[in-house]
Every structure is written in C-alpha cells, then in structure tokens.
Image: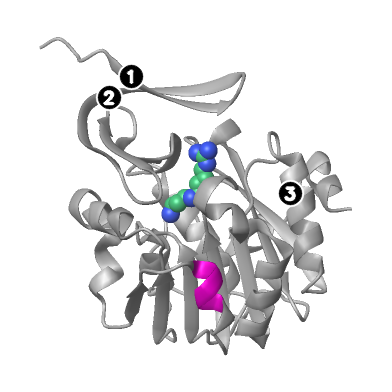
Amino acid sequence: MKKRQTWFTEYQTDSLSLGLRIDDILASETTEFQDMLVAQTETFGRLLVLDGAVQTTDKDEFVYHEMITHVPLFMLDAPKKVAVIGGGDGGAIREILKHPTVDEAHLVEIDQKVVDAARKFFPAISVALDDPKAHVHYTDGIEWVRNARDFDVIVVDSTDPVGPAEGLFQADFYQSIARALTDQGILVAQSESPFLHQDLIRSMKEGMKTAFPYVTLYVAAIPTYPSGFWSFMMASKQPVKPADRARTASIATRYWTPAIQEAAFVLPRFVGELLQ
Ligand code: AG3
C-alpha cells in the first residue's frame, strides 16, 4: 500500500523546522487553553503536539521523563512528597513512582483535555495516573504551588515559555516553589535547548537565583525537541550530591544510569558558560 504523504511540521524558530510523516491523525482539537494534536508517525510512534510544539512521542519520551525525575529524586535518600507542574501526559509521574519511598505524587495540570488524551492515546505513558499514590489536580500550577508545603521535589514539566506556561518561567513562581519545598528540597524545570534558547536559560538561572543559592544545569539528547539537545535546570537551598542509593538502585530505566546521574552535569563549554 502506498504510504500516506501527510506531514506534521513544527516550526521551531522562524527559520528552523522539524518534519514528521504521519500515518494518521488521531485527535485534533482546540481546548480551553491550547491547540492539541495527536498523530501516528512512522518514525516515533504516537506524537502529542500542543500549540504546534512537539511535547512527547512514544519512541523518545523515556529520555525526557527519566531525566526530569530520576536525576533530582536520586539526590535524596528518601523522597516522599513530589509534585509535577504540567506534565499532563503522566510520564513524569510514572517515573517518580518507581521510587519506593515516594508516597504522594501530585500532578498539577491546567488542561484536563491533555490528561484525557494521554489516557486514551498514550497508555504506556499515562499508566501510573491511576496509582493510589498519584493525585491529579486540574488547576493552575502557579496558584496550586502557593499553598503547597513540605515537598521533597517539584518538577516543572512545562511547555515552551509562551501561552499557558509563560508564568512557569518567572522568578516569583520559583520563589513560591522555594516556600513549597523542604530545606533539602529540589526544584527541576525543563529549560529548553542550549543551542536555541540561550537567553531563556540565562534568565531562568537569574530567576531561580532569587530564591535558591544553588542552581545547576544538566543535559540529555531528545531527538524530537528543537536541536535534539535539551537541558534541565536544578535548584536547591543546600548543595546536593547523588544519594548512595543512586549507585545501587535497581530501577527500570532506558536512559538514566548511575553514571548518567553524574555525567549529565558535565557540560560542554558553551553550555557551562550560560550559567556564569
Ligand atoms: N514538555 C516540554 C516540551 C518542550 C518542547 N518544545 C518544543 N517542542 N518546542 C514536555 C511534556 C512531556 N511530559
């Protein structure tokens, strides 16, 4: 049979795009907050797009979801209370619940339609959302964090800093996260591409520094995101280092390893310079 010649294109900048040939469009709707598309691609399996930006695919989601969660969680001996702001697909919650000490994993997603689509079209990603330890809140993460307390890790699994996620990149949000964390608590936020979003990375660092003395960056390869090279920013009130259990933990992962726990912070010179 002839292959369908329909393509999805993400316009990553005004002069750069990523194209994926798609076999089928599974959902396309405008929610209260954003445009959402779910499509079947040849190369990456199912694809979730919000406001024209690739959020996740079946084939490479493991990189992002493992790295945004295990790296901060393995800095602590026994993380118990964890929250994910955004991340409606549930991938971060799935990884967080692989840590046996976690007894509460909160997902704070503004757009219920994203969670509904994840349950329907991405069962392997959303699989943990029905776990009794998972608590799903459909509300604005900025509001929710204001009243949150005693969290060990808060993960900001946001879309790009335009539209609904804009406030998730601002200093006052980081300050309210600092109040929601324990003294040993850790903030991690996806921080876009070191090739394409250098000003953003610098401004996130300045914003986090208003609330946290320690701010670092680590990286991972994510083929469907702009430039394929992605970063995560981590902030804490005290210096952090991998817990002993990071070396011995038997946790099912495909990207994260005990060596990557440390190696991910080894930065190319041009990336390290973004933090100076
Ligand atoms: N959220 C971060 C995606 C940013 C990608 N940007 C882009 N394609 N322009 C991922 C959600 C996964 N839980």
The CA span between labels 1 and 2 is 5 Å
Q: Would you call the spot at circle 1 few (<14 residues within 10 Å), some (14-19), or many (20 or more)?
A: some
Reading the chain from its start, which is encountered first: label 1 or label 2?
Answer: 1
Residue in view at x 53 percent, y 58 percent:
67
Q: Which mark is residue 7?
A: 1
Residue in view at x 43 percent, y 59 percent:
87
Image height of 200 relative to 175, above or below: above
Label 2 secondary element: strand
Residue in view at x 61 percent, y 81 percent:
244
| Lateral position of residue 76 relative to residue 30, left or right | right
**In front: 43, or 189?**
189
Image quarter (top left, top right, bottom left or bottom right) of the N terminus: top left
Q: Which mark is residue 22?
A: 2
Report if residue 177 is visible in the image.
Answer: yes
Q: Which residues are magenta?
A: 141-145
Residue in view at x 60 percent, y 60 percent:
168
Q: Residue furthest right?
A: 276
- Residue 35 x, y percent position in the rendering: 37, 40
